[in-house]
Amino acid sequence: MKEPLDLLHVHPAEPEEEHGGFPRPGKSDSTVQAQGGDLVLRDPQAARPAENLTMLVSWAGHTDAGALSSQLSEALLGGLPHKLLASFDLDELFDYRSRRPRVTFLEDRFTDYDGPELDLYEVRDASGRPFLLLTGDEPDFQWERVSEAVLELVERLNISLVVLVDALGLPAPHTRPLGVTAHGSRKDLITGISTWSPAAQIEAGLGQVLEMRLDEEGHDVVGYTLHVPHYLAGGRYPQVAVSALEYIGAAMELMLPTDELRESARMVDQDITRQVSGNSEIQGLVHRLEQTFDEHATTEQRSLLVNEDDAVPDAEELGAAVEAFLRAQPTPEDTTTEDTTPEDTTPEGMGDESSEDDDTSSGEGLPRLF
């Protein structure tokens, strides 16, 4: 009988090198290490003992509105030091014929096959705090076995909290704050957070199964499902990634990069406003969605940044805290400035959840919704 971790290929430790513009954590810096084909915590008797780890789970699947998962992985792996720890064997888990990967044909040959992946990384946030990131494509098969493998990792690596994030396309206007449905076993991280908490039977995904299995085994787990306007769910919507990173950072106590995504979101907002202003049908739809949203919106939503009985700090207190943190950081000898202007911020496939197969980038306005 196969063991759950047989699905996992552990990558051997690599020498320290530059990775993604940051020094890759070497063996001496890694909280998790490869040892005999397994993943283990670093020796707690070492000079720097293993830290309390959390895990973030985000994968592309049927609850990935606004291309949330790919934007999160690009922001985290493109802006933070990280190390690839292990990969799932998706040949056993992926239905290639229902979700066909892409391959490039160049003149007389095929190149650049973009196959499915599901990888586990150790990442360090802006303050150097480590966490694990499980990201890639949602498996089609063996959900229980994949869940058992993640459970084994959680117990073996002493993971204190697992956070899952996903997004759904819902009838909400883009002119209002993104809603969220919070769920899981940590009441302090979900109470008062949700803007919509229905009682409904929905199509399950691996994320929901994994959350249930972690909860059943007594592990701390929370999930945040973001609400993306349904007419924007089929393309890249940076706003959903910004919101997700805010919830992730607060729940996992991490400092995560959002500057580039925020700039992309501002440009996307401008483009959406321009396109909507030229289409009376879309204007009417947005107005009706606004009316419905305002009638049913939650008037009070608790912030994860403060405890239930704490007072929200004012601007002066926040500024003092930021200054104290910056004074404690080492000053780099050389500082480089990168161009953070996004190359393409137009939402792809606006109003079409199958945008991978359709060309909706003509720039002539929003596609018809009905």
Image (tube, helix red, strand yellow):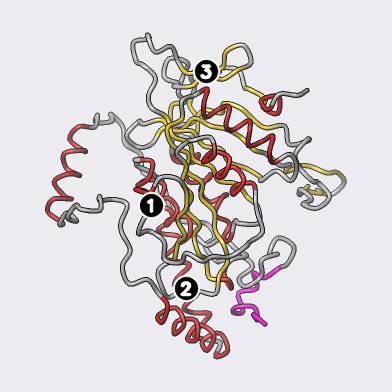
Question: Distance from label 1 to label 2 (Cα)?
Answer: 18 Å
The earlier-in-sequence mark between 3 and 2 is: 3
Task: From the top left corner, tell me how far across and down residue 4 is, in percent.
Answer: 68, 28
Q: Secondary structure at mark 2?
A: loop
Task: From the top left corner, tell me how far across and down residue 178 is, in percent.
Answer: 44, 66
Q: Amino acid at mark 1?
A: Glu
Task: From the top left corner, tell me how far across and down residue 162 is, in percent.
Answer: 48, 39
Which mark identifies residue 126?
A: none
The residue under the point 36% across, 44% down is: 337
Task: Give the answer, above or below, for where 257 lies relative to 262.
Answer: above
The residue under the point 13% across, 46% down is: 320
Q: Amino acid at mark 3?
A: Val
The residue under the point 32% across, 52% down is: 304
Q: Is residue 34 left or right of residue 261?
A: right
* Stretch in magenta: 359-370
The residue under the point 25% across, 50% down is: 307
Task: From the top left corner, tell me how far across and down residue 343 is, in percent.
Answer: 52, 57
Residue where numbered disc 1 is placed = 246
Q: 10 Å neighbourhood of mark 2: few (<14), some, or many (≥20)? A: some
Question: Distance from label 3 to label 1 (Cα)?
Answer: 29 Å
Between marks 3 and 2 in the image, the one whose residue lies nearer the viewer:
3
Residue where numbered disc 2 is placed = 174
Among the 4 quarters of the image, the one containing residue 368: bottom right
The earlier-in-sequence mark between 1 and 2 is: 2
Q: Is residue 183 left or right of residue 103?
A: left
Which mark identifies residue 40?
A: 3
**Residue 67 covered by magenta stretch:** no
